[in-house]
Amino acid sequence: MVIQFAYSLSNPLYPSSLVGLGTRDTLILEFSSTMMALILAGKIGSNITSEIGTMRVTEQIDSLEIMGVNSASFLILPKIVAVVFIFPFLYIVSVFFGLLGGMMTGPLAGVITVAEYIEGIQWLFYPYYVTFSLIKSVFFGFLVASVPAYFGYHVQGGALDVGKASTLAVVNTNVLILLFDLILTQLLLT
Amino acid sequence: MIDVKNVYKSFDEQPVLKDVSTRFEPGIANLIIGRSGSGKTVLVKSILGLYEIDKGEIWYGDVNLVNLDEKEKKKIRSEVGMVFQGGALFDSLSVQSNVRFPLDMFTNMTAKQKQERVEFCLDHVNIEPTAYKLSPSEISGGMQKRVAIARAISLNPKYLFCDEPNSGLDPETSTVIDKLLLRLTREFNMTTIINTHDMNSVIEIGESILFISKGEVAWQGTNREILNTENQKLNAFIFANKMYAKMREERKKEM
């Protein structure tokens, strides 16, 4: 990202520190929240759908129901709580390592010095951007856990249908993440 | 005892159960037999309250399940153990954790009491202590069924439901499971309902047999009576079963 910014801003009129600013804002506003959610929708989402879906087709959920356990609450709620809770922390970790990575790759590629980069990432910093993205990450966390759980819980058939449900869950989660990204940006940033 | 009176059930206006009436007595193995798609599983799920019936009554002792709300149904279900066709053991838990699961959810027992109960149940289904910490995928199909039976009896249920307990098992293991179910039924005086189409089970443990055909009760009797029946539908079912068993044995010999 740093290298791309450096090449697109390779104009003597622009200060080099803009590369740091662009990297920081991209990481904070989109990359660390939306991109991370899209990637984790593939990883966590397919995992949740296949786990719950397999439990459905092998009658493990029916078994819970007959025991008198509320299967939806028992299986889905802890996953939603866990993902919603961990997403903001992952966002912070992602921003930190993204900025650190930028500081290492920029000078290594010879497009910016460490001093210019640090000056850039401190320039025109709006703390509200972080708050905005933290709110986004909570919403995305909810989507990443709940949508695949819904698809897994309502699987009917066998192993093949669990696979299909996994794919559907990831696709739908990704579409919803992008849609909510638009809605939240419109509501909170404009 | 479970009394089923004039039960009707349909899906999308397609009748699946038509005026089914029967009684399942405690202390004996009550078998429901019939071809695939005859309505056996729908009947069992209706008795369990998983399906809402269109008409009729289902009595657990002196309580009519049909009149109960979801909370009261759960109370009845706490007296029910169920063995599913595939065992339905939780993959993420070990053998002993599977059996302990209902105890963790529904009792206030101490850890020591729970462990004693788990060992009691697993011992009753002849599972060796060496298998306690294995996961379900690490044990054989027959063992999985026995662990599922141990889990089903862990809360000392009044009613035990088994859906095709012998499916996927070889004849020898099937006999072991059948005898185990009969022994447990007698020992704990449970009302046991076994859904099967295995004629060996019918002959071996069928003290009370209900034959369902096209959603209707076509015949009721015992394993002694079934061999001399003149009911054409039942004879066709027995004949098809014998043919299948014979064909399977011949294939085995050929291989």
Image: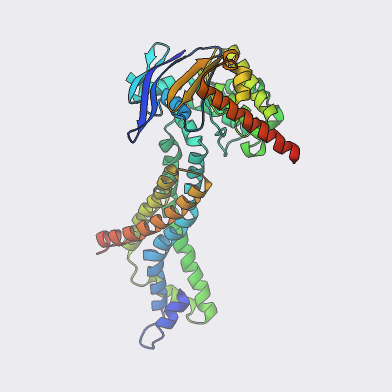
Residue beneath the point at 47% across and 80% down: A112
> Would you place residue B108 above or below residue A109 in this image?
above
Q: How is the image coloured?
A: rainbow
Q: Is any part of residue A145 visible from this angle?
A: yes
Estimate the x, y position of residue A85 in percent, counting from the top left: 42, 48
**Count of marks placed on residues:** 0
Closest to the observer: A34 or B141? Answer: B141
Dividing the picture into quarters, in which one does residue B235 lie? top right
Residue beneath the point at 42% across and 47% down: A151
Q: Going by the picture, which residue comes out furthest to the bottom? A: A12
Q: Is residue A62 left or right of residue A178?
A: right
Dividing the picture into quarters, in which one does residue A188 lie? bottom left
Closest to the observer: B186 or B89? Answer: B186
Estimate the x, y position of residue B71 in percent, counting from the top left: 36, 24
Closest to the observer: B29 or A182? Answer: B29
Q: Please identify the quadrant where the C terminus of chain B is shown.
A: top right
Q: Is residue B64 left or right of residue B253?
A: left
> Would you place residue B11 above or below residue B194 in this image?
below
Closest to the observer: B113 or B200? Answer: B200
Q: Is residue B17 left or right of residue B32?
A: left
Estimate the x, y position of residue B250 in percent, counting from the top left: 71, 35
Estimate the x, y position of residue B56 in percent, counting from the top left: 34, 19
Q: Is any part of residue B65 visible from this angle?
A: no
